[in-house]
């Protein structure tokens, strides 16, 4: 008689049903594991790279793994009603994502990389403890929300480009961390400006920033930048050597 392994865990009906859903998902491209008492993403999911829909709502999931980026065909992700608090930047790799439901989670903020999700048209953040700026943008609709992400994404992009330019061409002998700190101060002074302003700032770095890093004046840089969108243009100041 074969002796029963007393230490072998017996599969529950829920385990069996989960297995059936995983098999079905491989055929349909739609995984539905809502209300399965899951504490994390089941590892077999990451073998189903062609999934278009993932529903893990009403579970006990606290994190989205960085491996989310492998789902290149994902169009809908439902994670509502989970104790989830952080959304990783890797979600931006899901380029086809259209629907994202994070309602009734602990999410306070979303990464600026969301701006890269060009097909995203439906985001549900209802009953989330969102930070003020994100909450205001969300309340105004999807277009305003995406503009919020794009603005934050562009700010970081142009900040990095300006730091690089200053280091290579103007403040060659200054330490990069010193340059970065000064540029951070300038950008913090310009929180109300938009992408068009930062584009022009990059284009005219050599005319906006002084030759001596110690003379950087955030207020003066901002004013000159704003003036360039009014009656004057920066090209008019290119021959003016007494800006600083």
Image (tube, grey):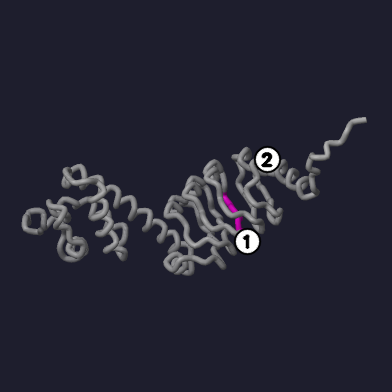
Crowding at dot 1, Cα within 10 Å, few <14 / some 14-19 / many 20+, comes out as: many
- Whether residue 26 is situated above or below residue 151 in the rendered picture: above
Q: Residue at x 46, y 66 (%)?
A: 131
Q: Quadrant of the N terminus?
A: top right
- Nearer to me, 143 or 103: 103
Secondary structure of the residue carrying tag 1 is: loop
Residue 16, quarter of the rendered image? top right
- Whether residue 180 is situated above or below residue 222 in the rendered picture: above
Residue 70, quarter of the rendered image? top right
Q: Residue 4: percent from the left, percent from the top?
A: 86, 36
Residue 243 — which label? none
Q: Is residue 109 left or right of residue 30?
A: left
- Whether residue 70 is situated above or below residue 181 in the rendered picture: above
Q: Is residue 104 left or right of residue 206?
A: right
Q: Quadrant of the C terminus?
A: bottom left
As for residue 45 lying within the magenta part, the answer is no
Q: Residue 195: percent from the left, percent from the top?
A: 31, 57
- Nearer to me, 17 or 119: 17
Q: Main secondary structure of the magenta part?
A: loop
Q: Which residue is mark 1?
A: 81
Q: Residue 198: percent from the left, percent from the top?
A: 27, 56
- Nearer to me, 206 or 167: 167
Q: Residue 60: percent from the left, percent from the top?
A: 64, 56
Give the residues drawn in magenta, as a range: 75-82
Q: Residue at x 46, y 53 (%)?
A: 114
């Amino acid at each position: 008689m074969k002796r029963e392994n007393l230490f072998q865990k017996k599969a529950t009906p829920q385990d069996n049903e989960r297995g059936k859903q995983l098999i079905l998902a491989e055929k349909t491209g739609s995984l539905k594991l809502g209300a399965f008492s899951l504490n994390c993403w089941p590892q077999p999911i990451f073998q189903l790279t062609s999934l278009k829909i993932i529903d893990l709502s009403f579970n006990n999931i606290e994190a989205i793994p960085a491996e989310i980026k492998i789902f290149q065909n994902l169009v809908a992700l439902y994670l509502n009603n989970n104790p989830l608090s952080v959304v990783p930047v890797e979600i931006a790799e899901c380029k086809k994502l259209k629907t994202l439901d994070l309602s009734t989670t602990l999410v306070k903020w979303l990464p600026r990389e969301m701006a890269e999700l060009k097909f995203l048209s439906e985001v549900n953040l209802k009953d989330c403890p969102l930070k003020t700026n994100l909450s205001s943008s969300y309340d105004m609709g999807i277009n305003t929300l995406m503009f919020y992400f794009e603005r934050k994404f562009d700010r970081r992009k142009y900040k990095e480009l300006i730091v690089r330019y200053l280091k290579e061409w103007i403040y060659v002998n200054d330490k990069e961390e010193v340059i970065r700190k000064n540029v951070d101060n300038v950008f913090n002074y310009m929180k109300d400006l938009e992408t068009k302003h930062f584009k022009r700032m990059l284009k005219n770095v050599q005319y906006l920033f002084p030759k001596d890093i110690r003379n950087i004046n955030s207020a003066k840089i901002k004013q000159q930048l704003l003036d360039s969108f009014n009656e004057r243009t920066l090209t008019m100041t290119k021959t003016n050597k007494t800006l600083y």
